[in-house]
Image (cartoon, rainbow, N blue to C red):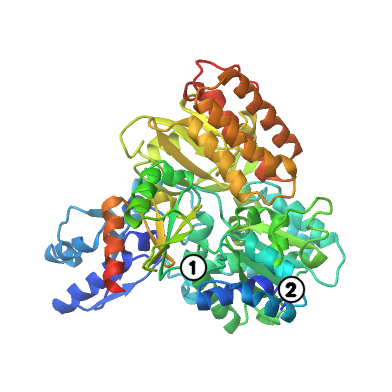
Amino acid sequence: MPGALLPLLHAIQDDIGYVPELAYSLIAKALSLSVAEVHGVVTFYHHFRTHQPGRHILQVCRAESCQALGSDALEIHIKNKLGIEFHETTPDGAFTLEPIYCLGNCACSPSVMINEEVYGRVDNKKIDQLISDLKNAS
Amino acid sequence: MTIKIFVPIDSTALSLGANEVAVAISKEAQAKKLDIQIIRNSSRGLFWLETLVELETPQGRIGFGPINPSDVKSLFDADFINGGEHPLALGLVSEIDWLKKQERLTFARMGITEPTNIDQYMAHDGFQGLKNALNLKPEAIVETVTASGLRGRGGAAFPTGIKWKTVLDTQATQKYIVCNADEGDSGTYSDRMIMEGDPFVLIEGMIIAGLAVGATQGYIYLRSEYPHALKTLNEAIHQATKIDYLGEDILKSGKSFHLEVRRAAGAYICGEETSLLESLEGKRGLVRFKPPLPAIEGLFGKPTVVNNVVSLATVPIILAKGAKYYQDFGMGKSRGTLPIQLAGNLKRTGLVEKAFGITLRELLYDFGGGSLSGKPIKAVQVGGPLGAYLPESQFDTPLDYEKFSEIFAVLGHGGIVAFDETVNMAKMARYAFNFCAIESCGKCTPCRIGSTRGIEVIDHIMQGHDVNKHIALVRDLADTMLNGSLCALGGMTPFPVLSALNHFSKDFGVDAIDSKA
């Protein structure tokens, strides 16, 4: 397969949630690349994580359309509610919080994505409900 | 007789609870022992009415919306299936003014068909363009696309036919068609709608492009933020391959075309065509120097057509109905239609496909219905995060590539994001620099360093430090980025920054600014 590195990294992250540094040398060997090249690619792309994330990944859109309908305040609310900043995981391992720049749901801002599902017209009440539903489920 | 009820499967509809609506409908129907069939159609793009539930009747499809899961019981209680009145009834969907006033060419099937049902695609004029193309010489296909006046809908507005001609004229053992589906611009979702809602039209456009330039392999570079589009595209490719529209010997023509979806990984810069090609090759998405053009040395060094989703999805109707049909829409050098995406603080958001020439004011007020908050609209960003902010005094500008260029603005990918009077434009200018800093590939200095210096200078202005001196610095920096950056990310970040500064100087703490952008 030509250009196999990104599909391979996706497959690893889809499977275990992140791309561990331990895997770099194996990937490099398989694709005849240097470890530095693999490291360079993993760290270039926002999508790839190098550490185990929480059980749920909560991504908050920070782009213009969401800002026009109050995503800044929503972002602060979520950070306070979970007690973490972006790129952090709650101490109980339940949530990892990440920024995202546009989910293509701009007709119904503000939007968040939780575990690859998009939610539109999110306000404080709706996000509180979503978070508590996930806490109860897990 | 089985009653057909349509509930969209588009991700914006899903984001508002369309799946829950479908489940609720199914439960109610079971409880009432009604014989219904729920069809998961694409979305009409009337997102302000989602979840838009439609009911098939002898007169046509009747709409109900916006329907929340909790509204479903009341629909059945009102006996909506037998014409019972309900406050959320909208009448015939095709007669809703917002939809009726549009000119849907590329989006003709949107909301009508089931996304991955290839028989329905064919029943609604699908593959007509491909069948015509199979009877034409490559030169004639390219000539048709050139004559239609189609320009790249990704944002750069480069004539599609001319790009194809370059690839056709370049001799090579292998050529590629690459679809840029890395729709990263905020306020845009037309690519997503096509891929989730009418994937075969994109596939058909790519096959035609392959026939036109002599390419046998295509890639769709899809942003990782669109998981539903990934599933839909893969299913559609599977369907098309099964009946020999894709693969070896397409419809026994002796021509072949293979297609594969590749996932991007959340880098905005990979929407830039050369960075996209690096990424497809499995590398960091660093922008390449041009020349050589991708049309001559593109993917893996081979001649490559890189086109946006909407551009490729517009090719089938041009080949089906002829260049003149498409060319007759539009104004000036902007021919055909533009799928405009209304977003942000507007009452009636969604997809408006109209011929070029409609004004921003018509879109914001006639279609958009004004701001959602009810407060006056203060600024509108057109064309994504690298597009200019326009004040009310520019709302009468017609949507036309050249008219926008005259006022130091861009149409980009057709996204329109409205802000009400509560927006602070100095903050939005700061955001533009910040976005550039986060997404810069780092190859050229004006973008890599300039974006961060820009944030610092705007911070000084926002804190009231030596405002006039720092405004002069911002202009100087913008000039360097505009003229010295390798690609549009650094080169166009000055658009939102300077337009904010020129049109909304009060937000920067000064009364008036001599605009020399």
Identify the residue under disc 2. B216
Relative height, residue B487 to residue B280 (above, below): above
Q: Is residue B144 visible?
A: no
For mark 2, name the chain: B
Q: Where is residue B406 in the image (x, y as percent from the top left)?
A: 64, 29
Residue at horizontal 63 percent and vertical 55 percent from the top? B271
Residue lying at the far right of the rendered structure: B171
Distance from Cα at disc 1 to Cα at disc 2: 26 Å
Relative height, residue B390 to residue B488 (above, below): above
- Say whether disc 1 or disc 2 marks the residue closer to the N-terminus: 2
Q: Do labels 1 and 2 share a chain?
A: yes
Closer to us: A99 or A26: A26
Q: Which amino acid does label 1 sit on?
A: Pro
SS at circle 2: loop
Identify the residue under disc 1. B227
Q: Which amino acid does label 2 sit on?
A: Thr
Closer to us: B183 or A128: A128
For mark 1, name the chain: B
Q: In which quarter of the image is residue A136?
A: bottom left
Residue at horizontal 87 percent and vertical 65 percent from the top? B171
Q: Do the residues labelled 1 and 2 touch (CB within 8 Å)?
A: no
Q: In which quarter of the image is the N terminus of chain B?
A: bottom left
